[in-house]
Amino acid sequence: MSLITKIVFILVLGFAASQIEKRRPIKFCSDITAKIKEICFECIKETNNTEHAWILFKEHRHDDSDCFKRFIYCSSTKSGYYSENGVPILDKLYNLFTDSDVRDVLKECRDCLNITTPIETANNFYKCYLKNSPAYMSFT
């Protein structure tokens, strides 16, 4: 890895870290948090992933690997927040995310969603949410 590549990599990581710090956490009740964790760990097994998928998810990061994309699709649809075609169900997400600015991002991401395969569609929405949301899901 060249020196320039290393510097750019460090700057990108620093920028990403600074962006999460500007966001506020959204904490769910213990029942919802437990259900999300349960579904995620079921999907880790079903999609032949490792706990690394959970770590990425709870750290609000995305991985473009097919394995991680299958994990996002599985957990999103199994939770009932996305339909089988990978499209998010806004009414259900609005029940989970009650802050108006987060709802605005959810709607914007849905409105500009590139609908392709179910797995890609679910991941496109998830990436849009990660990039644009003023808040992040806290699982602590």
Image (cartoon, rainbow, N blue to C red):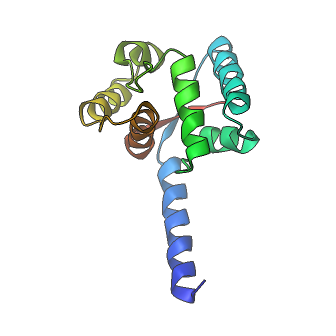
Residue 45 located left or right of residue 138: right
Locate the C terminus and report the quarter of the image it occupies: top right
Residue 101 located left or right of residue 92: left
Judging depth in this view, the residue of 80 and 67 nearest the camera is: 67
Locate the N terminus and report the quarter of the image it occupies: bottom right
Name of the residue lying farthest toward the left: 111
Judging depth in this view, the residue of 96 and 134 nearest the camera is: 96
Residue 85 located left or right of residue 55: left
Q: Position of residue 7 (x, y in %)?
A: 54, 80
Judging depth in this view, the residue of 23 and 75 nearest the camera is: 75
Residue in view at x 57 percent, y 27 percent:
74
Q: Position of residue 53 (x, y in %)?
A: 67, 41
Residue in view at x 63 percent, y 44 percent:
56
Q: Position of residue 5 (x, y in %)?
A: 53, 81
What is the quadrant of residue 88 in the picture?
Answer: top left
What is the quadrant of residue 40 in the picture?
Answer: top right
What is the quadrant of residue 123 in the picture?
Answer: top left
Q: Position of residue 73 (x, y in %)?
A: 52, 30
